[in-house]
Amino acid sequence: MTNTPPIRNQLLQALQPEDLRRISGLLTRVSLRPRQMLHVGRMPRERVYFIESGLVSVSGAGGRGKTVEAWLLGFEGTTAVPAILQDEEPALQCVVQIGGDALEIGRIEFMAVMEACPGIRSLLLA
């Protein structure tokens, strides 16, 4: 990621320099639009997002056909939790509430970099 703005995601900022170098070459900066669906529940996830700005809601089934918001992600978070836990079709969905930016990586590439850099997995599990 040469000639790009500095990384603002707090999880990525907390990585050891060598781990950050390893993953940063695989990240792509993307814009997030309000109401954009990043992940659909019970569907395979192809991409992982590290939120830089904006707000993403994570929600799941609450019974009786209702959806319940479980948590919100901002610049401190990522949609990578299911990938870290090796859940390929999580029940949770992720929807952009306030537009912004994120750093995006393919799930397969993310899994490979976590395997090569145990410090990344350790930090994200903490």
Image (cartoon, rainbow, N blue to C red):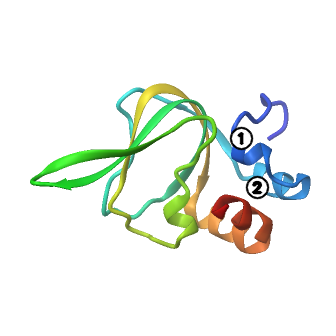
Relative to 125, residue 36 above or below: above
Q: Residue at x 31, y 63 (%)?
A: 42
Q: Residue at x 78, y 72 (%)?
A: 116
Q: Secondary structure at mark 1?
A: helix
Residue 9 screen position, x and y as percent? 69, 39
Indicate the amino acid at tag 2. Answer: Ile
> Is 91 on the left or on the right of 102, as rendered?
left
Indicate the amino acid at tag 1. Answer: Gln
Give whichever of discs 1 and 2 has the lower sequence position: 1
Residue 105 screen position, x and y as percent? 62, 52
> Is 68 on the left or on the right of 92, as rendered?
left
Query: Splitting the image into 4 quarters, where does residue 115 fall?
Result: bottom right
Name the residue tied to disc 2. Answer: 23
Residue 20 screen position, x and y as percent? 82, 52
Asked whether 51 or 66 is in front, the reply is 66
Q: Residue furthest right?
A: 18
Q: Secondary structure at mark 2?
A: helix
Name the residue tied to disc 1. Answer: 10
Q: Quadrant where the N terminus lies? A: top right
Q: Residue at x 72, y 53 (%)?
A: 26
Residue 83 screen position, x and y as percent? 53, 65
